Amino acid sequence: MADTLSGGCACGAVRYETEADPVVMLNCHCRDCQRAGGGGYGAFVIVPQAALRLQGEPRYYKTVGDAGRAVERGFCATCGSPVTAKLERLPEVIGLLAAGLDDPSRFKPAMDLFTQSAWPWDHMHPATQKLPRGLS
Ligand SMILES: [Zn+2]
Ligand SMILES: [Zn+2]
């Protein structure tokens, strides 16, 4: 039985919730996630997009990754918090930034992606699956 997963940005202009079970939880160490989040990686809870109720309108910034596929990262236009990420190749899901969850302790990453662009100061949990690039 799924619990409600909820969260949002720092100022509350963007809020979301879903009862769906996450598809996967992961850390992405690609350069775009590093720049968008200001840290070593982006921590994402991936959920079915159709099951997500979103209040407020994130502003989206689109980047095209090494594989030529676009990622749109949503952030609050008022406070700047990153909140969501949409993947062109996986339109049925949406990523939620783990730090934006109301209870971030529910984030349990199973894998680390794009470890080829991780930095020596970015230590990873030994138990996660490590992929040098994205999900192929
Ligand atoms: Zn905000
Ligand atoms: Zn990334």
Image (cartoon, helix red, strand yellow):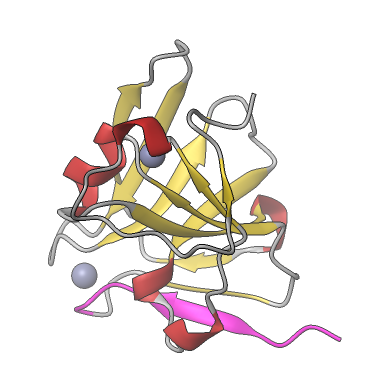
Instruction: Reply above or below: 134 against 27.
Output: above
The extreme right residue here reads: 1
The N terminus sits in image quarter: bottom right
Which residues are the magenta region? 1-11
Residue 50 x %, y % = 70, 54
Q: Residue at x 46, y 65 (%)?
A: 125
| Number of marks present in the image shown | 0
Magenta region includes residue 4: yes
Residue 122: which quarter of the image? bottom left
Magenta region includes residue 81: no
Residue 41 x %, y % = 31, 51
Question: Is residue 87 left or right of 73 when viewed as pictured?
Answer: right
Q: Main secondary structure of the magenta part?
A: loop
Residue 80: which quarter of the image? bottom left
The C terminus sits in image quarter: top right
Instruction: Reply above or below: 96 against 29.
Output: below
Q: Nearer the viewer, residue 27 or 129?
A: 129
Q: Residue at x 21, y 77 (%)?
A: 10
Residue 94 x %, y % = 56, 50
Q: Nearer the viewer, residue 110 or 91?
A: 110
Q: Nearer the viewer, residue 87 or 135?
A: 135
Q: Residue at x 54, y 26 (%)?
A: 88
- Report ligand 2 position as a quadrant: top left
Instruction: Reply above or below: 132 against 105.
Output: above
Q: Residue at x 42, y 87 (%)?
A: 102
Instruction: Reply above or below: 126 against 88.
Output: below
